[in-house]
Image (cartoon, rainbow, N blue to C red):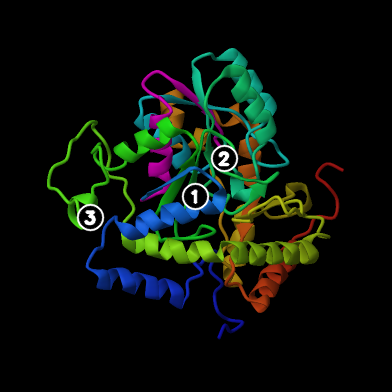
C-alpha cells in the first residue's frame, strides 16, 4: 500500500508472478545460459514485430555495435546521429574506429532534424550509415530518413531502445530501416533486467550478427551440449564478441512480451492524465498528446521566462516532495570525451543544448497508481505556481 509520504521512484519495472515462475523454470531446468528459452524469445519477438529475424543480445549497446559492424562500418567511416541521446548510441560507433557526425534536433520532437540530416549527407560523403533515435518513444522522421537512405544508398540502423511496441503506418518502429535495436534494460517498456534484441529482414546482416555475437563461432554454441547432434567440435571464423542473452533473461522477456500492449495502454493513460492536469500551465511545454508515442519517457520543458527558478532547482523541490524525476539527455557534444576528441563547443548544437537545459522527465510506468499520478501532477503544479513569473523577462 502506497502512502502519501512514500517516495515515488522515477522508474520501476513491472514484474509479476509470471516472470518469477519463468525464472524458476530455467533455474530448475539445469541450463542457465543461452539456449531454448532465448531461441523461443527470438521467434516470438520476430513474430510480434513482423521481422524475418530477431537476435537476442545482452544489451541494446551490444545490439547497436553488432548491427553497425554487420552493416560494414569500420575505421575512417562516419555515422550520422544525434547528440541528444544516451552515450551508447555514439560509443558503439567509436568501438568500430568510425566517427559520429552529430546533427542538431528538431525542437518539437527532440529527434534528429531531417533538414540537418539532408545537409550533412550532402556535405560529407564519408557518412556510411544513418543512426536515428526514437527519443522517449516518439518516432524519428522516418519518411524523410528513408528517402535520404534511398538517395545516398546507405543503411539505416534504428536505435529503437525507447520504441517498443509502437507501430507506424502498420510497421513497428525498429523494423523500418535495415536493422533495429530494442532495449530491455530495467527501466524500459519491457524488461529482462539487462538485454536487447536486434531485428532485421536482411539475410546477410542476420547471418553476420549470429556469428559475431558469440565469439565468432559458426554455429549455435548451445547445440554443442543440448541437441541430439551435440559435438565438442566448433570453428571460430571471426574474432567475435560475447554478447549473447542467457536463458534466465530470455524467460523473463517472453512473459514481458505478452504484456507489451497492456503496458503501452497504461502508459498512454498516464500521459493523458498528465496532459489533462498539466496542459493548462503556462510555465510548461508538454509533449503533444499522440497515439504515435511509446511513452517510454514523459519529457516536459520548463519555460524559463515564466519561472523564477531554473530546472535544477525545480527538480530539487520535486525530490523534496517525494517525487523522482530525471533529465533526458545531457547532449554528448558537451561530454568531456566528445568535446576533447572532436573539439565541440556547447553552441555547436543549440537546440540540443537548450532542450537539455530546460527539460525534465516525469514518472511514467505501468505500476504507477492513480494516487501517485495525482501526487506527481500536484507537485509540478504547486512548485511552478509558487515560482511563477507573470511577465516575461524584459517586458
Residue 329 rendering spot, x and y as whole percentages: 55, 46
Residue 133: give its label: 2
Report the residue at 51% width, 48% height from top: 161
Compared with 85, 297 (above or below) is below
Question: Is residue 68 within the magenta segment?
Answer: yes
* Quadrant occupied by the C terminus: top right
Q: Is residue 51 left or right of residue 24?
A: right
- Of 395 and 3, which appears nearest the observer? 3
The span shown in magenta is 58-83
Front position in the image: 91 or 147: 147
> Regarding mark 2 in the picture, which secondary structure is present there?
loop
Count residues near mark 3 (Cα–Cα under 10 Å), then give few for <14, some for 14-19, many for 20+.
Answer: few
Q: Assess whether mark 1 and mark 3 are in contact (beta carbons under 8 angstroms).
A: no
Q: Is residue 372 magenta?
A: no
Task: Provide the residue designation for mark 3.
Answer: 227
- Location of residue 296 in the rendering, given as x and y in whole percent from the top left corner: 59, 56
Could you tell whether 312 is left or right of 344 in the image?
A: right
Q: Residue 376, relative to residue 98: is it above or below?
A: below
Q: Which mark is residue 46?
A: 1
* Kind of element beneath mark 1: helix
Gap between marks 3 and 1 measured at Cα: 23 Å
Q: CA distance from mark 3 to mark 2?
A: 39 Å
Amino acid at each position: 500500500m502506497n502512502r502519501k509520504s512514500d517516495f515515488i521512484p522515477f522508474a520501476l519495472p513491472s514484474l509479476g508472478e509470471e516472470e518469477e515462475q519463468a525464472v524458476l523454470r530455467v533455474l530448475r531446468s539445469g541450463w542457465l545460459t543461452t539456449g531454448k528459452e532465448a531461441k523461443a524469445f527470438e521467434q516470438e519477438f520476430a513474430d510480434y514485430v513482423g521481422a524475418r529475424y530477431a537476435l537476442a543480445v545482452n544489451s541494446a549497446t551490444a545490439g547497436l555495435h553488432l548491427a553497425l559492424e554487420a552493416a560494414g562500418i569500420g575505421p575512417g567511416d562516419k555515422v550520422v546521429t544525434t547528440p541528444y541521446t544516451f552515450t551508447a548510441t555514439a560509443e558503439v560507433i567509436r568501438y568500430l574506429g568510425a566517427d559520429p557526425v552529430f546533427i542538431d534536433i528538431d525542437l518539437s520532437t527532440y529527434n534528429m532534424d531531417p533538414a540537418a540530416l539532408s545537409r550533412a549527407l550532402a556535405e560529407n560523403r564519408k557518412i556510411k550509415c544513418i543512426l536515428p533515435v526514437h527519443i522517449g518513444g516518439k518516432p524519428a522522421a522516418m519518411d524523410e530518413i528513408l528517402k535520404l537512405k534511398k538517395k545516398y544508398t546507405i543503411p539505416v540502423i534504428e536505435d529503437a531502445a525507447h520504441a517498443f511496441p509502437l507501430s507506424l503506418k502498420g510497421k513497428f518502429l525498429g523494423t523500418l530501416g535495415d536493422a533495429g535495436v530494442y532495449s530491455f534494460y530495467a527501466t524500459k517498456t519491457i524488461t529482462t533486467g539487462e538485454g536487447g534484441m536486434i531485428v532485421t529482414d536482411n539475410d546477410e546482416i542476420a547471418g553476420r550478427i549470429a556469428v559475431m555475437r558469440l565469439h565468432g563461432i559458426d554455429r549455435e554454441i548451445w547445440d554443442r551440449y543440448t541437441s541430439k547432434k551435440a559435438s565438442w567440435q566448433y570453428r571460430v571464423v571471426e574474432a567475435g564478441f560475447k554478447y549473447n542473452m542467457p536463458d534466465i533473461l530470455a524467460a523473463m522477456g517472453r512473459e514481458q512480451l505478452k504484456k507489451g500492449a497492456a503496458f503501452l495502454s497504461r502508459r498512454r493513460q498516464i500521459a493523458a492524465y498528465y496532459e489533462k492536469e498539466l496542459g493548462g500551465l503556462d510555465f510548461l511545454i508538454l509533449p503533444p498528446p499522440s497515439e504515435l508515442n511509446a511513452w517510454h519517457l514523459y519529457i516536459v520543458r520548463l519555460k524559463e521566462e515564466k519561472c523564477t527558478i531554473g530546472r535544477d532547482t525545480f527538480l530539487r523541490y520535486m525530490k523534496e516532495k517525494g517525487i523522482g524525476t530525471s533529465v533526458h539527455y545531457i547532449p554528448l557534444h558537451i561530454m568531456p570525451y566528445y568535446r576533447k576528441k572532436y573539439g565541440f563547443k556547447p553552441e555547436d548544437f543549440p537546440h540540443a543544448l537548450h532542450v537539455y537545459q530546460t527539460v525534465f522527465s516525469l514518472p511514467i510506468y505501468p505500476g504507477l497508481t492513480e494516487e501517485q499520478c495525482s501526487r506527481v501532477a500536484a507537485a509540478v503544479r504547486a512548485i511552478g505556481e509558487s515560482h511563477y513569473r507573470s511577465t516575461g523577462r524584459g517586458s
